[in-house]
Amino acid sequence: MAETVAVRPEEGRGPGGSASSAYFVYEERPRLLEGLRAYGLIVAMWVRSTMAYRASFVMTTFGNLAATAFDFLTIVLMFTHVDALGGFTLPEIALLYGVSATAFGLCDLLLGSMERLGRRVRDGTLDTLLVRPVPVLAQVAADRFALRRIGRILQGLAVLVYALVTLDIAWTPLKVALLPVMVISGAAVFGAVFVAGAAFQFVAQDASQVQSAFTYGGATLLQYPPTIFAKDLVRGVTFVVPLAFVSWLPTLYVLDRDYPLDLPEWVAFLAPVVAVAVGALAGLAWRAALRTYRSTGS
């Protein structure tokens, strides 16, 4: 699918053969490519703005890293009183935590601004995005891009490295290949949830907390082993909102542990397929929600 996105003047004769010093030729580009290009340009603008105050950037990034580190510190303190949680040791939970935190950190960096969409819908400022010749989704996702969120990624990677160094895992080529795949696929799954939540805000208008329950709340849920949760919750996170494919299923395969729902081992490799499927559904939800938008009229 393509849309008209650019105009360039050309010398010569205009339509109908009349002499003209310049006339305009409309170039068409695929919508996806134009969206990625627009996203990159907006992100670059915000990054330049951020790096104009480098000391502030360093301090806010460190603050973001320190704040998220308290999540794992809580788990560490918990293990000063217990030897295992749900049958999992601290390094095993660190692997769950590291995969989930890194995947969510990547998504939060790239799409974290989506949660502010409800405010734009309420005050009518979304109208300014609709009249620009670039996809609205790219503009909303890149709006106020916060490079300081890289601190969350660094913290998640630090815990992930600690887990990989500490654990005695029987590595196979499949397990090695699965590590980067589950981080990237996990970020894509979280991204789909962000987009679907933003689409819901077109209807609810003030639903950022509902969206956060599935994004930030889902990331926190996945940092703990599934064995401590009720099976109904595990089923919901597996088959309804498939966050289990972010870390639970692939990580338990790496650890040679059984999943509480007795699913076959090959399910752990479905993370990329699930990411594509939920991404497509989220895209359809976004398009449907955008068509229902009505300006405030103010």
Image (tube, rainbow, N blue to C red):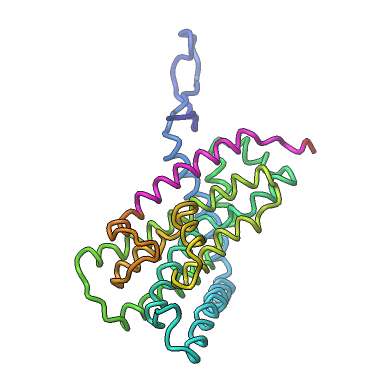
Looking at the picture, tell me which residue is in the foreground, 79 or 288: 79
On screen, 134 above or below 76? above
Q: Nearer the viewer, residue 76 or 184?
A: 76
Residue 172 lies, with reference to residue 119, above or below; the image says below
Main secondary structure along the magenta-highlighted residues: helix
Q: Quadrant of the N terminus?
A: top left
Residue 138 horizontal/vertical position (percent): 52, 45
Residue under the image location 62 percent in, 37 percent down: 130
Residue 282 image point, x, y percent: 50, 44
Residue at the spot 43% in from the left edge and 54% down from the top edge: 188
Q: Quadrant of residue 92?
A: bottom left
Q: In the visual, does 122 lie left or right of 111?
A: right
Residue drawn where x is 42% and y is 84% of the image:
84
Residues in magenta, as a range: 272-296
Q: How many marks?
A: 0
- Tell me residue 112's x, y (percent): 55, 58
Is residue 281 found inside the magenta-colored segment of the image?
A: yes
Direction left: furthest residue: 173
Q: Point out residue 11 in the picture as x, y percentages from the top left corner.
A: 44, 22
Residue placed farthest to the bottom in the image?
Answer: 80
Query: Could you tell me which quadrant the C terminus lies in?
Result: top right
Residue found 63% across the figure and 35% down from its top: 131
Compared with 288, 12 (above or below) is above
Question: Is residue 248 found inside the magenta-colored segment of the image?
Answer: no
Q: Nearer the viewer, residue 134 or 112?
A: 112
* Quadrant in the rendering for residue 93: bottom left
